[in-house]
Image (spheres, rainbow, N blue to C red):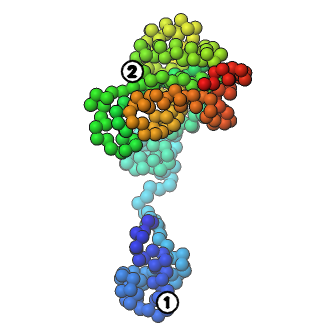
Amino acid sequence: MNSHKNAPLTPKGREAMVRCVEAGLSNAAAARQFNTTPKTVAKWVERFRASGVDGLRDRSSRPLSLPSQTAPATCAVVEVLRRQRHTGKQIAAEVGVSAATVSCILRRLGLNRIRDLEPAEPVRRYEREKPGEMIHIDIKKLGRFDKIGHRITGDRTGQSNGRGVGWEFVHVCIDDHSRVAFSQILPDEKAESAIPFLKAAVAYYKSLGVTVTRVMTDNGSCYKAFDFRDACRDLGIKHIRTKPYTPKTNGKAERFIQTALREWAYAQAYPTSDRRAEELPHWIHKYNWHRPHGALKSRTPISRLGLTEDNLLRLHR
């Protein structure tokens, strides 16, 4: 229990009180001295004599017995029926208890959702063998601002995008094998922006000696557009889309976005969103060339491209 800092009857205060009584002070006098009642003093003295100092600690308020609690045998039947995929109302009708009781039992058993009946799907981690075999592309929408934002100041006054500042869209790309990343800030998330970004990403990886053969995206409208499909075909890239509502399939891009938000977008108090945008290329360079990556055994992404020393010196600006 969290006690007030000046509370007189914390366990230490109770011990001082019962010590005074044990030394000869009456319950009434101890009650006046410790600003409580004689009945309370007698209670703590009795507990102290029965259990010592341990008896002065707070006890759980849970009753020792619950006569109206559902019988264990009934709970066992409820569990068996639930594992046979019966609904709560079906179980209630068959067992002869209320639906609310069934709901409480299932919640206590951790079976109140049908999906809880299935064993947890194991985490499937995968990584392509070579750089360029697959790149992951995604988009993060960020609000524009013309003064330090509420995430830094805590002041939301005038922060609504209804005042015309608007939005910007961070298009991100990350290589599945090396984790080398590429990103641009574009005005929208339409195919008119997604296609140039794809071409720029492919050109960037080509400048590093990496040939892109596959691209994975989610099911955003810009990626489902015929123009995007045609662009992939013209670039000789196979386009793969994730299964709906499974962002973990494109997890490397999702994780990269979280890192970018923490280490770039919200890392410092930018005076304007334009200043934040200017910082993005510098942070991307740091991410690719200097930042140790946990999934790469603390190596940098660029180290996985197998570049020669001459190429490293030429490309590192």
Q: Residue furthest left?
A: 163
Q: Is residue 37 left or right of residue 227?
A: left
Residue 47 or 63: which is nearer the viewer?
47
Residue identified by numbered label 2: 187
Badge 2 amino acid: Pro
What mark, if any, has residue 22 been given in the picture?
A: 1
| Cβ atoms under marks 2 and 1 closer than 8 Å | no
Height in image: 137 above or below 152?
A: above
Q: Which element carries disc 1, helix, strand or loop?
A: helix
Instruction: Please state the horizontal and vertical placement of residue 6, each as a whole percent of the image.
Output: 40, 73
Height in image: 208 above or below 70?
A: above
Q: Which element carries disc 2, helix, strand or loop?
A: loop
What mark, if any, has residue 205 been given in the picture?
A: none
Kindly tell me whether residue 142 is visible in this rendering.
Answer: no
Quadrant occupied by the N terminus? bottom left
Badge 1 amino acid: Glu
- The Cα–Cα distance between marks 2 and 1, rounded to whole angstroms, is 79 Å
Instruction: Please state the horizontal and vertical placement of residue 273, each as a whole percent of the image.
Output: 39, 31
* Quarter residue 66 falls in: bottom left
Q: Local crowd at mark 1 within 10 Å, few (<14), some, or many (≥20)? A: few
Q: Residue at x 43, y 81 (%)?
A: 43
Residue 168 or 112: which is nearer the viewer?
168
Kindly tell me whether residue 277 is visible in this rendering.
Answer: yes
* Quarter residue 221 falls in: top left
Height in image: 226 above or below 102?
A: above
Q: Work out whether mark 2 precedes mark 1 in sequence or the reverse, and give the earlier one.
A: 1
Residue 48 or 220: which is nearer the viewer?
220
Q: Residue at x 53, y 10 (%)?
A: 232
Q: Residue at x 47, y 13 (%)?
A: 195
